Image (tube, rainbow, N blue to C red):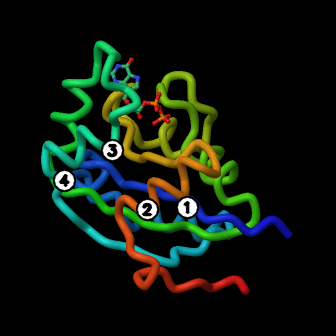
Amino acid sequence: MNIERTLSIIKPDGVEKNLIGEVYRRFEQAGLRIVASRMLQLSQAQAEAFYAVHRERPFYRDLVNYMISGPVVAQVLEGENAIERHREIMGATDPKKAAKGTIRADLAASIEENVVHGSDGAETARNEIAFFFAQSDICPRLR
Ligand code: GDP
């Protein structure tokens, strides 16, 4: 078993559209366990830092403004190959290119307003989990 943890965010459009339960249902149905969870309003500085890797991209300013446009829900997901499994459930960044049945294909409005974020690798997952959660916030379920 390759048990991993990954960082997931329901972005402001997902929260605004009342999709928290729908997204959580999909995580749980896929066998991912929610081991930490919190709702928060990101500050501009936090959103800029979280997406710093994209700071040279033309959409960076819009992305930061979108991410601070309302509250988000951040969670740590745990499970077998959780990083890759979560990315599969999310679907491609652009909902028009996302596979049918994925969160983004079914629920997202655009390449920017795409409902969810998920870590894209082991190191990113470690850093992104630490961005939102202290070790003591995490309640392991699979041990
Ligand atoms: P992800 O890992 O699938 O979320 O995709 P990226 O790391 O490449 O991009 C981060 C986020 O930036 C995406 O989820 C979108 O919200 C936004 N984004 C990515 N590409 C574009 C783009 O071409 N235009 C705009 N407006 N936003 C984008």
Which one is in front in this view, the residue at disc 1 or the one at disc 3? 3
Q: Position of residue 6 (x, y in %)?
A: 56, 59
Mark 1, residue position: 26
Q: Residue at left 67%, top 59%? A: 82
Residues 62 and 128: in front is 128
Mark 4, residue position: 42
User: Which of the two labelled residues, at mark 1 and mark 3, occupies the earlier sequence position?
Assistant: 1
Residues 112 and 53: in front is 53
Residues at marks 1 and 2, CA–CA distance in whole angstroms: 6 Å
Would residue 39 appear left or right of 7 to someone viewing this image? Answer: left
Q: Position of residue 136 (x, y in %)?
A: 43, 85
Mark 3, residue position: 50
Which one is in front in this view, the residue at disc 3 or the one at disc 4? 3
Q: Residues within 10 Å of mark 2 (few under 14, many from 20)?
A: few
Residues at marks 2 and 4, CA–CA distance in whole angstroms: 22 Å
- Total marks shown come to 4
User: Which of the two labelled residues, at mark 3 and mark 4, occupies the earlier sequence position?
Assistant: 4
Q: Please, what secondary structure does the residue beneath circle 4 have?
A: loop
User: Which quadrant, please, contains the N terminus?
Assistant: bottom right
Q: Please, what secondary structure does the residue beneath circle 2 have?
A: helix
